[in-house]
Amino acid sequence: MIIVTREGITEEELDHIRERVEAMGLRTHVSRGEHRTVIGCVGDEGRLLHVPLTSIPGVETVHEVMKPYKLAAREFSADPTRVTVGKMDFGGTELGVIAGPCTVEGSDMLRETASRVGAAGARALRGGAFKPRTSPYSFRGLGEEGLRILAQVREDTGMPVVTEVMDTRQVELVASYADVLQVGARNMQNFALLSEVGRLRRPVLLKRGMSSTVKDFLLAAEYVMSQGNPNVILCVRGIRTFETATRNTFDLDAIPVLKQETHLPVIADPSHAAGRRPLVAPLAYAAVAAGADGLMIEVHPDPECATSDGEQSLDLNEFDALMAALRPFASAAGRTLPAPSEAVASMSV
Amino acid sequence: MIIVTREGITEEELDHIRERVEAMGLRTHVSRGEHRTVIGCVGDEGRLLHVPLTSIPGVETVHEVMKPYKLAAREFSADPTRVTVGKMDFGGTELGVIAGPCTVEGSDMLRETASRVGAAGARALRGGAFKPRTSPYSFRGLGEEGLRILAQVREDTGMPVVTEVMDTRQVELVASYADVLQVGARNMQNFALLSEVGRLRRPVLLKRGMSSTVKDFLLAAEYVMSQGNPNVILCVRGIRTFETATRNTFDLDAIPVLKQETHLPVIADPSHAAGRRPLVAPLAYAAVAAGADGLMIEVHPDPECATSDGEQSLDLNEFDALMAALRPFASAAGRTLPAPSEAVASMSV
Amino acid sequence: MIIVTREGITEEELDHIRERVEAMGLRTHVSRGEHRTVIGCVGDEGRLLHVPLTSIPGVETVHEVMKPYKLAAREFSADPTRVTVGKMDFGGTELGVIAGPCTVEGSDMLRETASRVGAAGARALRGGAFKPRTSPYSFRGLGEEGLRILAQVREDTGMPVVTEVMDTRQVELVASYADVLQVGARNMQNFALLSEVGRLRRPVLLKRGMSSTVKDFLLAAEYVMSQGNPNVILCVRGIRTFETATRNTFDLDAIPVLKQETHLPVIADPSHAAGRRPLVAPLAYAAVAAGADGLMIEVHPDPECATSDGEQSLDLNEFDALMAALRPFASAAGRTLPAPSEAVASMSV
Amino acid sequence: MIIVTREGITEEELDHIRERVEAMGLRTHVSRGEHRTVIGCVGDEGRLLHVPLTSIPGVETVHEVMKPYKLAAREFSADPTRVTVGKMDFGGTELGVIAGPCTVEGSDMLRETASRVGAAGARALRGGAFKPRTSPYSFRGLGEEGLRILAQVREDTGMPVVTEVMDTRQVELVASYADVLQVGARNMQNFALLSEVGRLRRPVLLKRGMSSTVKDFLLAAEYVMSQGNPNVILCVRGIRTFETATRNTFDLDAIPVLKQETHLPVIADPSHAAGRRPLVAPLAYAAVAAGADGLMIEVHPDPECATSDGEQSLDLNEFDALMAALRPFASAAGRTLPAPSEAVASMSV
């Protein structure tokens, strides 16, 4: 921590600031400039988190030197973390594609979707059973019945399932069905929920909050990890800005920033970023080109009749086309994708 | 709902769109312009929420005509809603001031704060027992012990208490101690929590999310109200923008917008908006001038030693000064404040 | 300037960084922490502006210690700057109100507006002759004819006039008619224009750019001042955020921040912030409560027929009502306003 | 234009609104719903731009049906526009890469850069002679001397040059040297400058403003085109958001949106978006994957010693590496790049 003091600070004020810092077990190092005196604080910066430094008389600004996250930081792990989901690892060379409907609407539509997206190269099936909806009057999902359908389709197709958990009281229930627990953008700072999914070892797919900085995002991952669960997959999905031409503004630059800052796998959800079907494919290619470890894409057999997010869902043929066009981009990025036939084979178990 | 179609739409596409709308029980009304044909949908717009209109071929844009919230809308209630807390009503002529520390740190500091802020004209005491913290390594509050201290201080001083609830599993516990349940900015779209506090009749102080629009905010209130709890106090507290000179950007203009759009009381939290002590007072005066029904202000006997938010907490004398300077602004806004002596009297029960 | 180095920096890298800094004539001061070494740079920070410090190997982050603006900084002037416009000073005790139509449409409407707003307590008349319009197909003002009308109405009513200049080639022309040169939000970083108005001594009303930080805003003022023109009035008018309920988000908190950071007068334009007539008055009261030195308000004799900004223009009676209601707020803020009669008298010159 | 009226509107109010619309030569079409009456306005929407519809009593909201830009709209041109610069067309199959230093610092550094970036496949040279700088104390370029150096290096290497124009008074001067006139982000709504460059036929590289919507951006292009200059290249370069981990937030999703909305070529400037060297390459690959017609990249022989933007400038080897890694992405996107040898050949003229 570096403390910049106000112009004209008195020696008494300076001493008082140093005492407060040293009382927390850090050493201080004073550097007197022409206009400002600067105090460097050497030692465990975390101990200063409790001290409202800027409210001490004479303090002008405070600059953090250390990153506030530890377990999520790149420096914590020599190698990229791999999170195993079904037969593949997120964070390895293979690009992990998760696809499926926004909401589980029934077993036939889900099984059809799973078969087709699996055949095209997706490795996991998404589908919402508990849905966060901005309006209390929108359809909020089938609940536990949706979870049962997910589990049944997994059994039928061999595809691991990703589904959202919204309530601390449901973590155990959702975890009893799901292979990956999704924490949605609106719950990215629901700290009780983060702690709860951190108590399990089940992989967590953590979506970036709409107005969260990269630092906030990594601190949310730190919540999960600090409870003992290292299996966190980060997912960018668009942030909120002044632009109204898209549902959200795709935070693509967060992908290379995150790859620098953390060892955790990073995937992208171009469907929510775009909010409109024709934009999904170009954003998906771009995410892979920027270094994403995977994609999550909304696919529905009949988007026009989807109970939610139909505007941004691809139909089954559009998803096939996207996956075919994605291959050369994946290859340019040094990534592999399962061959369509291999995927089909793996499903016929 | 008004549907604007693409240039060059075919009659078949037009018919298909109308069929989809009419199948939901609305009537359609077609208006053919020179370049675009527009379809007006007459009837219960809510039924169209499930239909992904923009994914139907030929649709260019869709404009909502009705507000998506009902119970929270100004039109729903002829008179402003009054939410009773202790001896006063939020939403009436009297300006309701809530003050106290960010976090309950102990019974002495809380009792001292309560006595002093009550004497100065505050009508309720705030204090966090369960604290949402961006970092898992920050102090997260005393928990139930904090609730017990709040209840004890209420007994000692007669001040009703406002405290945050963060977890659906704790709603019952917090409600057994608190007079007002606060839902924080980070949980404004924690729909499970909103529903849970909606099942009680206890007043809910709902803070605006950092990147929530006014519409999102009112839909969050609608979640609470649609469960049967009409006692919602809205609180603006700053939104997240590109500006870094303040902790948040104070969303003051939301105050008159909300007063137009809803019958619910609207208060402001200048402490979180400002993030720095010297800005709290001017923002408080401004909020009252803009029509706020009340204020929530962080006050601590020794801000320099506060366990959280010390930078933005006023000390007891600063709060006295703010309240004194606030009186002529309140009066200019047609509002009353309890006389300092009266407040002292009410506390000596 | 404080330079934080990367973990594991070598002595050679450290030496190289110090050499680069010292070559610019500053001294360096090294503080070795457990994980990071920090280099304090003592001397004239401005000299380091040309050095891309973060591109030097081993540098992680750089923190500025000094403010990048000098002439505009609070420290530069012991007293608040007063900018004289007609018979009053912006930056003194009197609240300076500028009112008038968005666009000069003709001499009758302008004279009527000037008389009425002057009688109500406004001290200067606004009106656009050259209008920045987002669309090339919108009306862009009467040009020089508009300037002539402004000058004529000033002669008739004694009201000084404020009008916008958009083009370096027109600065001389506009200055030959106007008492105050307005630089609009879209031109806040039109550095050629800032320099050009800086070469005159005519007061400049500088509006904050829609996505400019407070620091950018003060640097724009510094451009004007560094050319020799100290007569800058800063005007907040709303910033661009994700919120769509208002035309802009009123940046009210910038008022007390600016009053802390600079000695220049600060006024507010609630009309552009609000974008809708019913919001103008509450935002105006709030701006004064927050410490603004004045207001700029759009007023039109018949807003429904205004050629631009009719949605946010008050009619003459609404302006009278606003000024009447503003008085107690001004008084609460320790400000004066000219008595309505006095204003009338001053106009009958 | 569609006008939604307030609940409870009277017949007189309704008639008045219709009269106002019909007086502008449009027909009205009334659709009465259960709660709201909607008025469709059929005819030339542009005529309603002057009418402040929302200020007419009884009007609640107004929705535009037509796009406000005409010449820039996709519908205006059957084929994508190609803008010829030197030996290639922006908007064709070949990916157009512009590279060079932020600022022209001298002829040797510029010639060296031009030779190397040309050999690597860049088709045009960038370099600033007049520089917009946030601080008046930063280096603002060599001015006309910089233009002369650019022209000399063009003669030596055969590379066309792109340089910024900031002042209406300099348009003619800059155009006498430059092949492409760049209008920077801060001047995107400098309407006088847009009109001035629109009077020439020289290609204009128009950068998106930091807080401009896609609609604002296309209206800025419309300014240029409406003066008669169809040769506009749009350039995305990052927008301003709450995120501080990058200099700007890369507005990648604007690329496919713009490709849908307009026939103009769209390129990306990953250097300004990123603000940091290690992020430039991944953002460049992503932009091409998303459909960009070209790239503009800052390259400097010695970034550590650059007079501006050294943090985000690649050195010559890094640029070679980027171009090599870009080829498979370009190929995946159906784009070509000049072979390195071919580029070398073209330079040896």
Image: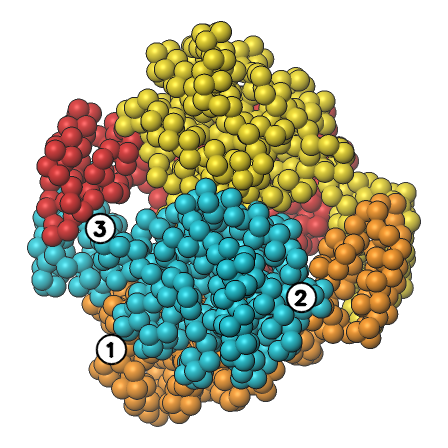
Chain colours: A yellow, B red, C orange, D cyan
Badge 2 vs badge 3, beta-carbon distance below 8 Å: no
- Location of residue A104 (image quadrant): top left
Does the rendering let one see residue C37? yes
How many residues crowd mark 3 within 10 Å: few (<14), some (14–19), many (20+)? many
Q: Observer-nearest residue: B293 or A243?
A: A243
Q: Which residue is mark 2?
A: D301
Image coordinates for residue C246, horizontal then vertical, percent: 38, 53
Residue type at tag 1: Glu
Up/down of A137 relative to D55, above or below = above
The residue shown at (18%, 47%) is B7
- Location of residue C166 (image quadrant): bottom left
Q: CA distance from mark 2 to mark 3?
A: 51 Å
Q: Secondary structure at mark 3?
A: loop
Same chain? Circles 1 and 3: no
Image coordinates for residue B308, horizontal then vertical, percent: 71, 41
Q: Secondary structure at mark 1?
A: loop
- Location of residue A101 (image quadrant): top left
Q: Observer-nearest residue: A191 or C335?
A: A191
The residue shown at (76%, 38%) is A75
Q: Nearer the viewer, mark 2 or mark 3?
A: 2
Q: Observer-nearest residue: D298 or C248?
A: D298
Up/down of B141 relative to C185, above or below = above
Residue type at tag 2: Pro
How many residues crowd mark 2 within 10 Å: few (<14), some (14–19), many (20+)? some
Q: Observer-nearest residue: A48 or B284?
A: A48
Q: Is residue D143 left or right of residue A52?
A: left
Q: Nearer the viewer, mark 1 or mark 2?
A: 2
Query: Which of the numbered marks, if any, corresponds to residue C105?
Result: 1
Q: Which residue is mark 3?
A: D65
Residue type at tag 3: Val
